[in-house]
Amino acid sequence: MNYNPFSLAGKMVFVTGASSGIGRQTAIECSKLGAKVIITARNEERLQETYNNLQGDGHSMVLADLTTSEGLDNIVSVVSELDGIVLCAGRAMTSPFQFNTREKYDDVFNVNFFSPVELLRLLVKKKKIAKGGSVVFVSSVGGVLGFTLGNSIYGASKAAINSTMKFCARELAPKKIRVNSVNPGMVNTPLIKGGTISAEQHQADMERYPLKRYGEPEDIAHGIVYLLSDASSWVTGHSLVIDGGITI
């Protein structure tokens, strides 16, 4: 029996931030489910690693910096009609509010908010999204359902993404384009490593989660696959929380 409502066979899916973490795993999972995948990121070596792990054929990779107009124009010019878009590129920053300068806000918002929103705008304007297409923003529970000390810049960027997602869902519905977001809790990716929080502090934080662990990139990728697939064809304007129960 081959019935699978979550299949992505025959779909062209574009994934940003595909060089590591959630973006990389999402691209790999999409390829496993039959999609042809276009991946993009700034780091060529790590992007190539992702490409090498894609299953099937017909995939492609585009090296681009989405914080620049040149990078955005390059993406829009080379992609064909897309059935799915996953806007995953992002960065974190921990900074107490009193030290949150305009430069810090600009640094985070340029990556987390302005770049994905402008890319989506250009793809819509250039009619690069197929009828019945699905757009998935990768947001966060941070700044939306949880408010951690020192996390206000990152949280504000993710709250802005969730708000914009809902406006896009309303405005693009007549074009039969669905727009949703996934909102992860803490996930074991390079984004949470190498900062000011020690392994011991991470372990203590995990104990706060009802499921007693952080998420893995696959946990989030599977939620994204659902939103890209025909299984979610009546879902738009929704913020899907995947957080190990931390927000309860």
Image (spheres, helix red, strand yellow):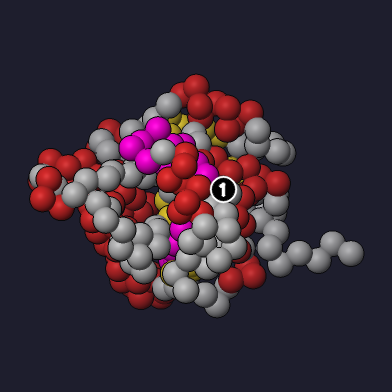
Closer to us: 242 or 70: 242
Q: Quadrant of the N terminus?
A: bottom right
Badge 1 element: helix
The range drawn in magenta is 179-197
- The three-letter amino acid code for the residue at tag 1 is Pro
Say whether residue 200 is visible.
Answer: yes
Query: Residue 111: image x %, image y %?
Result: 29, 43
Rendered position, 223 above or below 105: below
Location of mark 1 (residue): 217
Residue, x 58% and y 58% (percent of image)?
Answer: 212
Q: Is 168 situated left or right of 202 in this image?
A: left
Query: Residue 107: image x %, image y %?
Result: 21, 41
Residue, x 50% and y 27% (percent of image)?
Answer: 46
Closer to us: 242 or 87: 242
Closer to us: 145 or 54: 145
Rendered position, 200 above or below 86: above
